[in-house]
Image: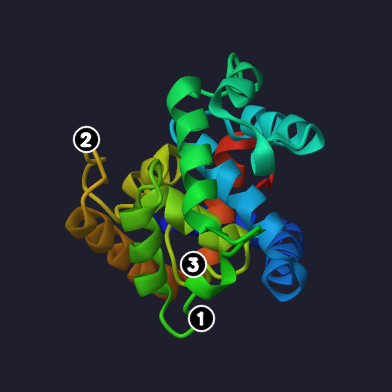
Amino acid sequence: MRNILRSKLIKEYKRRRPEIKKRLSEFRSIIRCAGDKELFFELCFCIMTANANALHCDTALRVLKEKGLLLGGACRAIRPHLRGRVRFHNKKADYIVAARKLLTCGSHIDIRTKLDLEDIIATRDWFVENIKGLGFKEASHFLRNIGLGKDLAILDRHILKNLQKHGVIKAIPASVGSRKIYLDIEEKTRRFSKRIRIPMDELDLLFWSIQTGFVFK
């Protein structure tokens, strides 16, 4: 049964591979070309996506960017634009403002100095420990979306469901919030990725697109 599932997965990968690779190339262009403000916008998106619909969060992000609220808005100005689109909108407005304060150096947002390109795991740990509202999943999501997630797993419900389906994990844990549990499942995903010869970041987008019908971020 699992061999059949694996064959179907590889067949689907071959079909979606050009679209997946194109999307990942776009992510990699962000770390090469984007300024700190753009990196901060992506961080805000990943703060919003915890337990929320990514498409609705993207809509909220666009509105907040257009109105200049991500870089200068108070919590009370941000909240109305999250309400109805983003779960726990009050808390997430607080998290966005707290992240902006933490990452502001003088009059500028400073994210690049927090990125250790030689040690992405340590970089992820820093964001989890210092940015309110980011767990390992959200921090991995952020790093992937700026082109630094080649060897990271984004363990959301879509990915966990597929990992269980393919026998990578026996059961979906109640929570992947602890570092130990997250790293354990991530390593199992890494080994599975090598066995089926689909890179980790491509496997993530493949699973996500199988569940949702399209490649997003």
Q: Position of residue 137 (x, y in %)?
A: 40, 50
* Mark nearer the viewer, 2 or 1: 1
Q: Residue at x 73, y 65 (%)?
A: 35
User: Label 1 is placed on what type of residue?
Assistant: Leu
Q: Residues within 10 Å of mark 2 (few under 14, many from 20)?
A: few
- The residue that label 2 is drawn on is 174
Q: Residue at x 51, y 48 (%)?
A: 101
33 vs 56: above or below = below
Q: Secondary structure at mark 1?
A: loop
Q: Nearer the viewer, residue 202 or 27?
A: 27
Instruction: Indicate the quadrant where residue 186 lies.
Output: bottom left
Instruction: Indicate the quadrant where residue 83 lies.
Output: top right
Q: Position of residue 65 (x, y in %)?
A: 75, 39
- The residue that label 1 is drawn on is 117
User: Label 2 is placed on what type of residue?
Assistant: Ala
Q: Earlier in the sequence, mark 2 or mark 1?
A: 1
Q: Position of residue 208 (x, y in %)?
A: 55, 45
Q: Earlier in the sequence, mark 3 or mark 1?
A: 1
Instruction: Indicate the quadrant where residue 205 lies.
Output: bottom right
User: Label 3 is placed on what type of residue?
Assistant: Met
Q: Nearer the viewer, residue 159 or 127?
A: 127
Q: Position of residue 43 (x, y in %)?
A: 56, 50
Q: Residue at x 43, y 69 (%)?
A: 193
Q: Which mark is residue 200?
A: 3
Q: Residue at x 46, y 72 (%)?
A: 151
34 vs 179: above or below = below
Q: Nearer the viewer, residue 59 or 109?
A: 109
Q: Earlier in the sequence, mark 2 or mark 3?
A: 2
Q: Residues within 10 Å of mark 1 (few under 14, many from 20)?
A: few
41 vs 190: above or below = above
- Furthest-right residue in view? 66
